[in-house]
Image: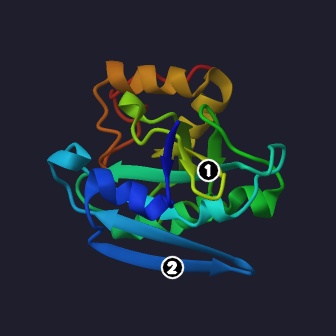
Amino acid sequence: MISRVDVRSYYTEDWGNPEREAEFQKGEYVIGVLKWQASASTQGVNIYATVGASDYSLPGFGMEHRQEFFVGLAPECDDIASPLARLGIYAQLAGKSLAAGHVYSAPQGLMEGSDLSGFVLLAPFDGLPAPVELADGRHVEFLMAIPVFRDELEFASKHGVDGLMEVMESSQVPFWNPARRSAFDSGLGPAPRS
């Protein structure tokens, strides 16, 4: 596990300085979302990442275990910042933690004008960003959030997130594109199994 001063400095080591920053508050919880433009260091996608989710302890874990979330999109979609922040405080509001392989259903969908309904969570591809130990002793894991449609959420709930990712890969679904269609729409993939 890598040791760093804080999450923000850890992000900037790999991705440089963020282009934009937003802050979201729900009750006592404050979560920032940082944005990086698509570049070679971001593997060609725009990165949106929470900063501050790791300020709060997680139900069911030791006090030192924390999480942050990120999503990579191309083209950019700044409207994802608020849903990503809500994902960052979900554990505190719901009283249960998330992990790789879990699904998150957004109460009102992810974004106005979109049928995206939630996220599936994965360990980062290529292991980056890797878990980090902060100077104050917190251990932070990073989870990749992929925006998905209701039928994809239902499929992942029944058959696992890995099963959904296999369908997306075999159907060549560009999961990083916020304007894409569902993997189960008009011949883009097999019909959802019951």
Residue 15 position in % (x across, y down):
28, 55
Number of marks in the rendered image = 2
The image's colour scheme reads rainbow
Q: Is residue 23 left or right of residue 78?
A: right
Residue kind at label 1, given as amino acid type:
Gln
Report the residue at 31% width, 32% height from top.
173
Report the residue at 57% width, 53% height from top.
134
Quarter holding the C terminus is: top right
Residue kind at label 2, given as amino acid type:
Glu
**Up-down: is 35 above or below 194?**
below
Q: Nearer the viewer, residue 124 or 119?
A: 124
Res 179 seen here: no
Report the residue at 38% width, 56% height from top.
11
The residue that mark 1 highlights is 67
The residue that mark 2 highlights is 23
Residue 12 position in % (x across, y down):
33, 59
Res 159 seen here: yes
Q: Nearer the viewer, residue 129 or 88?
A: 129
Q: Is residue 94 left or right of residue 178?
A: right
In the rendered image, the residue lying farthest to the left is: 40
Report which quarter residue 121 is drawn in.
top right
Q: Is residue 26 left or right of residue 178?
A: right
